[in-house]
């Protein structure tokens, strides 16, 4: 009994230590963002703010300079929202349709096609930069929010397809056959039978795509136009705009603003994420 | 013209793998057709073709007098019960039953009436609001049948519907399927590998092996006059005793012992070109007596109402199936007797029935 307790204690101790270690940067960011400029200059990195203030947050949001303009992160934030939401929804929907076809409506060559799509999952992003800007130029959507959205949709399809295809392989084929005999069409089967059974993988894919696209910097900096830069680019510009004094508290607040949406998604849907990743075939 | 006719169906994969090698079957309206055979015989492929889920390389399938060979499933006026039930997990029992009607744009009132009718027929009224995940195996089976019944199809297809149930439930559901068919008189095609299901349910049985129909007939024909050695051994439990024999002047003999034949069989054997035959005897045709073929009792398997006894004789092991309890002990010498007209004769190389 004693030995067991000791093991328990050791286990908890180590876990707590790791938790502290990983949470430390977040702690530093939060407390720094709440300090005023004087305390940031003078103080200890780990000390609590003596006079907590949200002024750096409001500055980061609306008045901090990001290059020549001084409107804070606000415009970048909304650029990101406008671009990320449709990109996530469209890439997820296309992935689920692809997965449905590649698992339940196999045709000659569908496995080869899937293998090629898998290639897209592992391809480094940098490889497509030049050809993609060429294509966006041809399509006339270079340097626009549409171009950036299109790039994220195309780049997301391989992984969303992989997620949905592997999940749908676990759905019994007889379900599809039964629906066919009931007279349901390709799309009726998809919307009435397959989609309602997809909740776990849908949540996983939405979180995955949201995190990836929201946090993306490379495509954002390369393909966006002057008025469609996403928040990651805004954050970079904000932190790199030199003024007389480095305002660490504003930088921290800005970084937290940029990270909040993904944090929020994880907190709200995190348990579905883990559940979805481990969920097996639907029993029924 | 029958309610279902299958004409010269072939199925070939990659030009080399022949799944079905020319199937011809025809049944009348209201008949219950069984497709039975060991796994890999092509029975499920054939059923899928009738359902429109698979397509023949050549041949035709007619339902009523309509050629449906190239029609999609939904236009064939059929319904199917799957081995895994394939109930839609996201819908309630009532929605499952009504789904086919809903897709076909049947008005709501009519749909509800159909659900009530089916629920009453299958006694699942109390389950209508549940999800399939909350049902037991037998209940799921019933709902799957309900879904098929709701549309009142011209043809009912069953794909090994009882193989996921435990033994007791299987017998119950078998009886229920039979009663259901007696009541609705819907033409039915039923695939199974279980010869008891085949014998108990079928009006007509097609015994299949290696992509060919070995015999097509009523259960009685299949049992009493199996067309070949495969059918004889596949149908019936315990399996038919088979003894390798040679023709001689009196009839046939094995290991120097003459075996009786009826006159017609002797004539047929004499006319048959080959000399090497197989002599088949159903276990229930053999009885114990004071004289006859001697042998040593090597195993006794009591089942309650009857007893299976295995006897080592000069012509090989013979299994007898006798009513009640057998008062004998293993090792005892016993005598076996049977009447000559109970024997079946098959050609040893081709397996075809001789007489």
Image: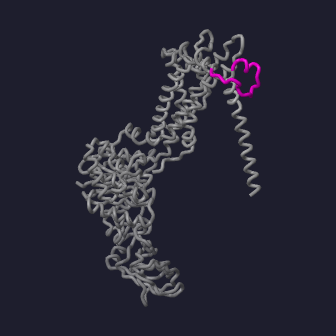
The image position of residue B289, as x and y in percent, is 42, 88
Picture layout, residue A61 above or below residue B121: above
Q: Is residue A49 magenta?
A: yes
The image position of residue A6, as x and y in percent, is 76, 51
Q: Which residues are magenta?
A: A36-54
- Frontmost residue, B202 versus B295: B202
- Left or right of A168, for residue A183: left
Picture layout, residue B283 above or below residue A243: below
- Frontmost residue, A257 versus A181: A257
The image position of residue A206, as x and y in percent, is 52, 33
Q: How is the image coloured?
A: one colour
Picture layout, residue B25 above or below residue A159: below
Q: Residue furthest top?
A: A68
Task: Judge whether residue A217 can be spotted in this image.
Answer: yes
Identify the image quadrant of the N terminus of chain A.
bottom right
Count numbered badges in the picture: 0
């Amino acid at each position: 009994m004693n030995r067991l307790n000791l093991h328990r204690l050791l286990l908890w101790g180590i876990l707590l230590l790791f938790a502290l270690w990983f949470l430390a940067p977040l702690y530093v960011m939060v407390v720094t963002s709440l300090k005023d400029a004087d305390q940031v200059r003078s103080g200890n990195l780990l000390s609590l703010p003596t006079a907590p203030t949200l002024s750096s947050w409001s500055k980061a949001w609306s008045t901090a300079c990001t290059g020549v303009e001084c409107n804070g992160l606000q415009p970048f934030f909304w650029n990101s929202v406008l671009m990320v939401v449709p990109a996530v929804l469209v890439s997820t929907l296309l992935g689920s349709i692809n997965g449905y076809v590649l698992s339940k409506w196999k045709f000659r060559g569908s496995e080869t096609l899937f293998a090629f799509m898998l290639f897209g999952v592992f391809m480094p992003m940098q490889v497509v930069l030049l050809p993609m800007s060429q294509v966006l130029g041809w399509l006339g959507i270079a340097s626009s929010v549409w171009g950036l959205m299109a790039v994220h949709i195309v780049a997301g399809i391989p992984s969303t397809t992989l997620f949905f295809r592997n999940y749908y392989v676990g759905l019994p084929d007889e379900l599809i056959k039964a629906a066919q005999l009931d007279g349901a069409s390709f799309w009726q089967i998809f919307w009435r039978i397959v989609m309602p059974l997809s909740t776990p993988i849908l949540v996983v894919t939405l979180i995955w795509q949201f995190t990836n696209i929201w946090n993306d910097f490379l495509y954002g900096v390369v393909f966006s136009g002057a008025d469609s830069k996403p928040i990651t680019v805004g954050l970079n510009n904000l932190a790199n705009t030199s003024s007389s004094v480095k305002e660490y508290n504003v930088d921290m607040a800005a970084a937290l603003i940029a990270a909040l949406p993904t944090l929020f998604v994880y907190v709200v849907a995190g348990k579905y994420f883990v559940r979805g990743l481990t969920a097996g075939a639907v029993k029924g | 013209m029958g309610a279902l006719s299958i004409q010269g169906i072939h199925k070939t994969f990659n030009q080399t793998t022949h799944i079905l090698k020319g199937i011809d079957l025809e049944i009348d309206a209201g008949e219950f057709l069984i497709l039975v055979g060991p796994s890999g015989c092509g029975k499920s492929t054939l059923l899928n073709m009738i359902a429109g889920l698979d397509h023949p390389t050549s041949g035709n399938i007619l339902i009523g007098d309509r050629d449906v060979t190239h029609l999609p499933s939904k236009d064939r006026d059929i319904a199917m019960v799957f081995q895994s039930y394939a109930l839609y997990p996201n819908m309630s029992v009532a929605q499952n039953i009504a789904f086919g009607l809903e897709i076909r744009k049947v008005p709501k009132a009519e749909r509800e009436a159909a659900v009530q009718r089916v629920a009453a027929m299958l006694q699942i009224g109390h389950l209508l609001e549940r999800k399939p995940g909350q049902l037991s195996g037998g209940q799921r089976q019933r709902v799957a049948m309900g879904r098929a019944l709701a549309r009142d199809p011209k043809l009912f297809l069953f794909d090994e519907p009882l193989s996921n149930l435990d033994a007791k439930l299987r017998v119950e559901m078998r009886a229920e399927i039979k009663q259901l068919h007696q009541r609705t008189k819907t033409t039915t095609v039923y695939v199974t590998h279980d010869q008891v299901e085949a014998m108990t349910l079928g009006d007509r049985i097609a015994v299949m092996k290696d992509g060919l129909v070995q015999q097509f007939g009523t259960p009685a024909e299949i049992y009493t006059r199996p067309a070949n050695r495969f059918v004889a051994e596949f149908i019936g439990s315990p399996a038919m005793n088979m003894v390798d024999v040679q023709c001689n002047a009196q009839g046939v003999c094995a290991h120097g012992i003459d075996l009786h034949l009826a006159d017609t069989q002797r004539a047929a054997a004499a006319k048959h070109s080959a000399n090497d035959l197989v002599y088949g005897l159903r276990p229930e045709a053999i009885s114990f007596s004071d004289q006859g073929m001697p042998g040593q009792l090597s195993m006794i398997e009591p089942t309650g109402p009857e007893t299976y006894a295995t006897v080592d004789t000069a012509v090989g092991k013979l299994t007898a199936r006798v009513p009640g309890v057998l008062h004998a002990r293993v090792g005892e010498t016993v005598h076996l007797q049977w009447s000559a007209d109970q024997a079946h004769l098959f050609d040893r190389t081709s397996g075809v029935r001789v007489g």
